[in-house]
Amino acid sequence: MKVALVRHYKVNKGLPENHRLSTDELVAWFQEYDESDITYGETDLNNIEWKRCFSSDMPRAHKTAKHIYKQEITLLPELREIPMPIIPVKFKLPFILWALLFRMSGLINKQARTDMAETKRKVAAVLDCAISESEDDLLIVSHGGIMKFMRKELIKRGFKGPRFDIAVNGKLYLFEKQENETY
């Protein structure tokens, strides 16, 4: 069985022009990012005839999935990006500092830890269902953060595949499991 992970194509919304943002400005920027269109690209599907495709129901992932997979796509809210934990502050922070706070949020923010644990549970449930339901090769289009969790879950289940820190937009990451292996 093969499972491929693809991160959505690049979002057209660039980084904030004003590099110092208040909490409200950051929330507004993320909302615009979520609603922004994508720059379509090409994805090498490794000459594999994918039998199933799951996608996050967020527009950037769904549009990417429709572009690379011409059959029925199962949209799953469980594959949405991890919510950005917004830490209310009374002053503006540089965008890079917001990004670092997000990366460290699991250490400093109880809600972020809860969100990450819930995301891991959802990813595990999606993979459990997908793998037990069918041995057909599966294409999953989602988001960078979710893909890290999916990779770990696939490895736990005996799949072999590439390492990545930040998934490249539109690149296919192939994970394979030999037929005689079980998890």
Image (spheres, rainbow, N blue to C red):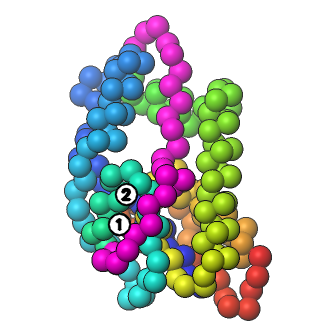
Q: What x and y, as percent, mark residue 4?
A: 49, 74
The residue tagged 2 is 61
Please say if 150 is above or below 132. Answer: above
Judging depth in this view, the residue of 70 and 105 nearest the camera is: 70
User: Is residue 160 visible to us here?
Assistant: no
Q: Amino acid at mark 2?
A: Ala
Residue 77 is covered by the magenta coloring? yes
Judging depth in this view, the residue of 172 and 179 nearest the camera is: 179
Question: What residue is rendered at 68% in x and 28% in y?
Answer: 110
Q: Determine the main secondary structure of the stretch shown in magenta.
A: loop
Q: What x and y, as percent, mark residue 58?
A: 39, 50
Question: What residue is rendered at 49% in x and 58% in y?
Answer: 76
- Which quarter shows the C terminus? bottom right
- In-image side of 85 versus 93 (left or right): right
Question: What residue is rendered at 39% in x and 26% in y?
Answer: 27
Give neighbour class at mark 1: few <14, some 14-19, many 20+ (Cα, 10 Å).
many
Which element is circle 1 on?
Answer: helix
Residue 125 lies in what quarter of the image?
A: bottom right
Which element is circle 2 on?
Answer: helix
Whether label 2 touches label 1, CB < 8 Å: yes
Give me the disc on residue 65: 1
